[in-house]
Image (cartoon, rainbow, N blue to C red):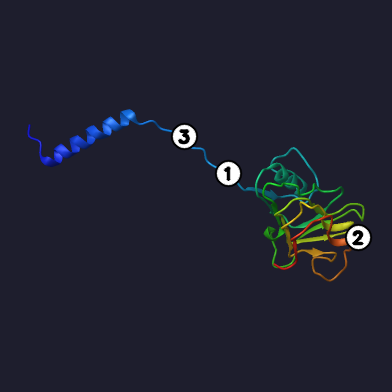
């Protein structure tokens, strides 16, 4: 058998690779922690918490976002009125913020199609206690305060495209008892309005 120079190079390379593979020691490298964005889709107008995993209310979506580390988004696959009977969970996830985006509801064309209506002036509509949250495209009325940012930890939040204290057409009053949006108790660097 005759070996050409190319055959010799291949056999030499193969032998060298074989020697290296005997001494190859794979090693693990630590990576930074990563959290996936969680998406919660509100698909009922009922203000309930129920055991059915196929039904998600706004209340359940906020609870899920608070429990999930990292940034979260709450979208809507329903339009209409959510009659809020008791205080909704506060937005408290300090690990990335939550986006509540009612502009994703069917029929949205620049004005809110999802309304949060309170039981009177006894509770606040949404309370934001953490940073990096966005509330977008809701109509909010009949609460003590429509949206309250009332903690020193409530910073860099955005409220945009919401109709607060008026109906979804912007024509009739649906007042809140104390304030439409309250920024207090050390909350800072929050943007209210625009889109």
Q: Which of 114/74 is in front?
A: 74
Left-right relation of 121 to 25: right
Does any portion of residue 142 appear in the rendered image? yes
Numbered label attached to residue 28:
3
x and y percent of residue 51 in the render? 74, 37
Please tell me whether residue 142 is drawn above or below residue 52 in the rendered image. below
Q: Which of 43/170 is in front?
A: 170
x and y percent of residue 130 in the render? 75, 50
For marks 3 and 1, give the CA distance.
17 Å
x and y percent of residue 192 in the render? 76, 64
Identify the image quadrant of the C terminus. Answer: bottom right
- Which residue does the numbered mark 1 point to in the structure image? 34
Label 2 secondary element: loop
Count of marks, rendered view:
3
The residue furthest bottom is 171
Numbered label attached to residue 182:
none
Q: Rate crowding at label 1 as few (under 14), some (14 to 19) or many (20 or more) other CA atoms within 10 Å.
A: few
**Marks 2 and 1, the one that precedes in the sequence:** 1
Identify the image quadrant of the N terminus. Answer: top left
- Which residue does the numbered mark 2 point to in the structure image? 178
Left-right relation of 43 to 26: right
């Amino acid at each position: 058998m005759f070996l050409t120079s190319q055959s010799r190079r291949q056999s030499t390379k193969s032998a060298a690779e074989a020697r290296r593979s005997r001494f190859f020691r794979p090693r693990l490298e630590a990576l930074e922690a990563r959290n996936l964005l969680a998406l919660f889709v509100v698909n009922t107008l009922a203000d309930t918490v129920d055991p059915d995993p196929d039904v998600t209310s706004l209340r359940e979506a906020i609870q899920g976002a608070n429990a999930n580390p990292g940034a979260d988004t709450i979208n809507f696959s329903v339009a209409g009125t959510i009659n809020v009977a008791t205080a909704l969970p506060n937005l408290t996830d300090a690990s990335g913020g939550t986006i509540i985006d009612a502009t994703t509801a069917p029929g949205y064309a620049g004005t809110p199609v999802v309304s949060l209506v309170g039981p009177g002036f006894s509770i606040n509509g949404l309370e934001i206690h953490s940073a990096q949250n966005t509330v977008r495209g809701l109509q909010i009325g009949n609460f003590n305060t429509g949206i309250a940012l009332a903690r020193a930890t409530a910073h860099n939040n955005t409220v945009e495209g919401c109709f607060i204290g008026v109906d979804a057409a912007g024509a009739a009053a649906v007042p809140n008892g104390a304030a439409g949006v309250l920024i207090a108790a050390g909350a800072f660097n929050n943007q209210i309005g625009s889109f």
